[in-house]
Image (tube, rainbow, N blue to C red):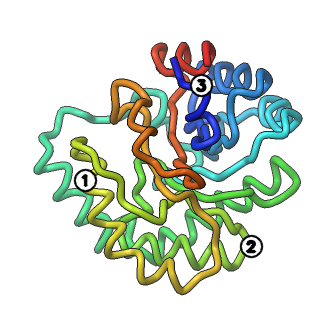
Amino acid sequence: MLKKEHRKKIIFSADDFGVNELANANILKLAQAGKLDRVEIMINNRLRKEDALNLAKTGVKLDIHLHLIGYDSNYWQGERNLERGMVERICLFVWNCTFGENNPRKVVLKWENQIEKFREIFGRYPDGIGSHEHIHYFPFYFNILLGLSAKYEIFYVRFGRRNFRGTCLIGKILNGLRVIDQWLFKKTNFETSDFMLSFDWFTDLDFLSEISEGKNAEVVFHPERVEEFSFLEKM
């Protein structure tokens, strides 16, 4: 159970609103109960306006969860090929980022389209900006994200000012990318948390005792996962 003195250190964020009915229902329930501070919205053709408007009524901060998948894709409904090995997947990612569908020029258009779809659904632009699987930490995408943040006046960026000590491989990779990205971020006046962490990197939140007074951490949850939903519901 979360210690009371740690609550004020945490920005509770939920990812993937819009990815499926379970995620939407669980996130909406938590937002209505006041368990969340921010929700990242995944824009796709299965995001129902009714669900979106019900979420907006809770008063939670509404961020956009940018992704590289087409608006009409069935990717989120299980049409992913996860049989490829890690090396092959990395090679495909690098190739697509450089020459394929996810090269920077095409990504700008994809992400602008998602931001405009967000405005159509919610009647305004997002409160904050981030991305699925933290892909915006890669420098060529981070530069794009900061440009879109300025263009659409989205002043909160999921990023984190500092690296947090941890043993998770994903966390270590993001720490390395953050060091590279810092020089770009420091040129802006955008807001972010002191640290950015994902709940599934840890077994509990006792690590928050390491964060000094007056600092905060954005902790990312995926409430479609039973254990993460249960943790937030009992908090």
Q: Nearer the viewer, residue 49 or 154?
A: 154
The amino acid marked with disc number 2 is Glu
Query: Element type at marker 3?
Result: helix
- In the picture of the structure, the residue carrying the numbered disc 2 is 153
Query: Element type at marker 2?
Result: loop
Q: Residue 201: give x, y in percent of width and height.
A: 33, 35
Query: Element type at marker 1?
Result: helix
Q: Which mark, residue 88? A: none
Question: Position of 36 compared to 85: left or right?
Answer: right
Q: CA distance from mark 2 to mark 3?
A: 28 Å
Q: Specify few, some or many for label 2: CA neighbours under 10 Å numbering under 14, 14-19, or 20 or more.
A: some
The amino acid marked with disc number 3 is Ala
Q: Is residue 42 above or below residue 161?
A: above
Q: Which mark, residue 172? A: 1
Q: Which mark, residue 23? A: 3
Identified at 59% across, 82% down, the residue is: 188
The disc, 3 or 1, on the residue closer to the chain's N-terminal end is 3
Identified at 14% across, 44% down, the residue is: 86
